[in-house]
Amino acid sequence: MGEVYQARDTRLDRTVAIKVLPDHLSTSSEIRQRFEREARTISQLSHPHICAVYDVGRDADTDYLVMEYLEGDVLSERLRKGPLPLDQMLRYGIEIADALDKAHRKGIVHRDLKPGNVMLTRSGVKLLDFGLAKDIRPLGTSGDTGDSASPTQGDLTREGTILGTVQYMAPEQLEGKEVDARTDIFALGSVLYEMATGRKVFDASSRASLITAIMSAEPPSISSVQPTSPPLLDRLIQVCLAKDPNERVQTAHDVMLQLRWITEGSQVGLPAPSVTRRKNRERLAWSIAAVAVAAALWLGLAREPSASTPDARVLRTTLLLPEKVALRNAVISPDGSRVVFSGTDSTGKAQLWVRPLDSETATRISGTEGAILPFWSPDGRYIGFFADKKLKRVDASGGAVLSLYDVDGVGGAWAPNGDILFTAPSGPIQLLAAGGGDPRPVTKLEGSATAHRYPFFLPDGRHFLYLALNLAGTSKDPSNQIWVGSLDSDVARPLAAANFNAQYADGYLLFVRGGDAGGSLLAQVFDPVTFETSGEPRVVAEYVALYGEFLGFGNFSVSSAGSLVLDASRLLTQLEWLDRSGSSVGVFGEPDLHYSPRISPDGKRIAFDLYDAGTQSTQIWIGDVSRGVQTRLTSGPGFNAGAVWSPDGERIAFQSDRKHQADVYIRASGGTGTEEAISDEDGQKIPTDWSQDGEFLVVFDREPAGDRLIKISGIHLTGDRKPFTVVPSLPGNVADPRLSPDGRWVVYGSDETGRMEIYVVSFPDGERKLQISNAGGRFPKWSRGGKEILYAAFDDMMMSVAVDGDEVLHASVPRPLFPFPDGVFSWDVSADGERFLVNVPVIKSSSVPLSLVVNWAASLKP
């Protein structure tokens, strides 16, 4: 849409391109809106393979965009000459996928990707024309002839409109369904096919027959047109072109990674193997990864690169979990052939799953309900784990579960002789002999350290790495270190100051360095015989998530065969407003790494946590709802998070690790004045609510001994400020306590019965208790002056319960309000219960992918 002219920017002395809206279209306010939307959309994107926009304006009756001037050929014109050489096709494909990935991470779907919107320049491709992107919804069909449907007045808002180019449209786009990033993946597959073969993937004599072909026909394979093409390229394009969006490659990033791997395989003259068609997204993602790993093993890439394959290349890919399973942590087997992971399903129950990398399915292991922190036996036959406050063992192929010892464990490791190391929440590391008997300590607490955690055996099977922590100290406490211990002596040797666990493989010590939300995975040369480190640590992965249930645990695992898995999920989220029917009524701010939004009592401001990648810490920001302005409230030291508004909105209570692992501080919400420390004794205090009379804070309260069980306490702000217990530590965990507006009740979640349910207890005495939910629930909140409790059911449905009463609380049967958007991280509700602020991922997925890196150490070789 629009004519493009070359022009000269006399102010900045540069050549530019000016895109002008034709006169016959400029009279349509809807089309002018689309034109302006293109400018706004492109302005959000800064990427070497996306055409930049410099300015937008209107001169008299002429609307225009000022854009980057590009010299080169349009891809559609180049394809008239025939297919591209393989190396060129792969390079352009990687660049297009990279550009799409950038757009998708910003929440932008192109919707009209085609060769005519790709410019070939000396510096590579440039993606053009985001005029259909962002908020325009394709809702149906329009017109009956031609390749492209041109919008007329009303097209942007009228049902029954196709926006885009039919030849490259995905089936859901043609059907008028909601589109997302996977719609662009289909178009990308079409463009890749055309670059590889010189032919359109679907061709027909009429528009109607073209739509029929896209909806129902399977395109000829690339190899039938280009027999020398790599088989994996054929397979990759096939899955990009899957009719069902759930069966496609799910992200442009994954397409880019696969194209890079095909490029590397082509450069050494080796085709990549193909795989068979899968039946759903999870199987597809795993099967592509399995083939890639199998090929890597076939090429010798998964061997130790320093010894057998000095020219081995690094392979990076992603692995999706089974549908609706949320990751807790994952561990790769010693030989690198399988992954065991602890995952929580839609009922809130955690279980173990095992996934061979050369198989199509992940197998749930029966009898492992509640399992955390799994670890492998050296031969890969057994899996150890912790559940029900016991150390347990199960055969990796399933079968009877054997309880080995009573302990609320936070880390285990299996010795070659069958001995097992394990740790309790606090205290030294214990050894349980293979022959049974009572465990014995094999480490000794030194200095101010209160806990030794996360043992990991070195190759000799006698020495092991572990992390020492002062659970009541600061993140800079000198006791927080990685040590080398021995089964033969309690004498240990410190290696490095650290706040996170360490592992060893391939001549390197691997550890995490970062903050509260995650950090970088580093590797440093390490001699497992002399226990000496040398050289500077080097980055293996820019980001690895932390296992939030445990202090000091980075979610990564390395095998002795040269493979690495890690949770590198750091999804951008968007703060979105919903009404009481669940319909979106607006957004706040731009996509970012948001956490824990909290609406002010008057509804005019929002407090939220924002992850700062530069300092790798979380800080609190305040947003003005009406103006959209965001200002930073805290800036350190350490992390500051979990804002709680005072009843008048003048102050914010929050947690900070500047002195202890989590202490309570208060600051003026306007950012003026100094911060006041409320708690200063050992242990962790995390504020969750503030009473309407201003007298009390409700807090999570964790004892300094390191027990994972948390009680709910109150702090009398105008009294002695000593915490008093409201809900004692229970057999399960407690979560999300909120105080009723009248100050008489606290609502919270607890899994004391084996499933997280919602309860109410009287405040401050904690003597009267009532269960609110009847089928599980999370994240409870009060609304409508304390006459309603809202919570999230495990099927992601917002539930409402009417409550009434003073001395005795009465509750109605829970009723559903609306389904949550996919992947909600956190949410809050306005005081009147009419508006919900939800924090949702920009690119929605039902499960978080694991990152798999084969030959990770090869990236560190000079």
Image (spheres, rainbow, N blue to C red):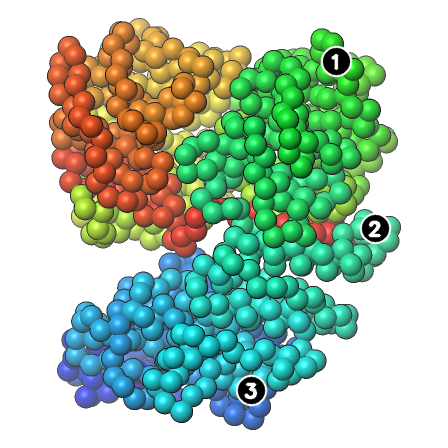
Measuring from the top left, give residue 691's x and y in whole percent.
22, 19
Residue 761 seen in the current view: yes
Q: Nearer the viewer, residue 754 or 75?
A: 754
**Few, some or many residues within 10 Å of mark 2 (<14, 14–19, 20+):** some
Q: Nearer the viewer, residue 666 or 12?
A: 666
Judge from the rendering whether residue 789 lies leftward or rightward of residue 390; answer left or right: left
* Quarter occupied by residue 223: bottom right
* Quarter occupied by residue 394: top right
Measuring from the top left, give residue 242's x and y in whole percent.
48, 67
- Choose mark 3 or mark 1, whichever is in front: 1
Measuring from the top left, give residue 275's x and y in whole percent.
64, 64
3 or 1: tag closer to the N-terminus:
3
Q: Which residue is mark 3?
A: 198
- Choose mark 2 or mark 1, whichever is in front: 1
2 or 1: tag closer to the N-terminus:
2
Measuring from the top left, give residue 226's x and y in whole percent.
64, 83
Amino acid carrying label 2: it is Ser
Q: Give the SS element for disc 3.
A: loop
Residue 502 seen in the current view: no
2 or 3: tag closer to the N-terminus:
3
Q: Which residue is mark 2?
A: 306
Q: Nearer the viewer, residue 144 or 148?
A: 144
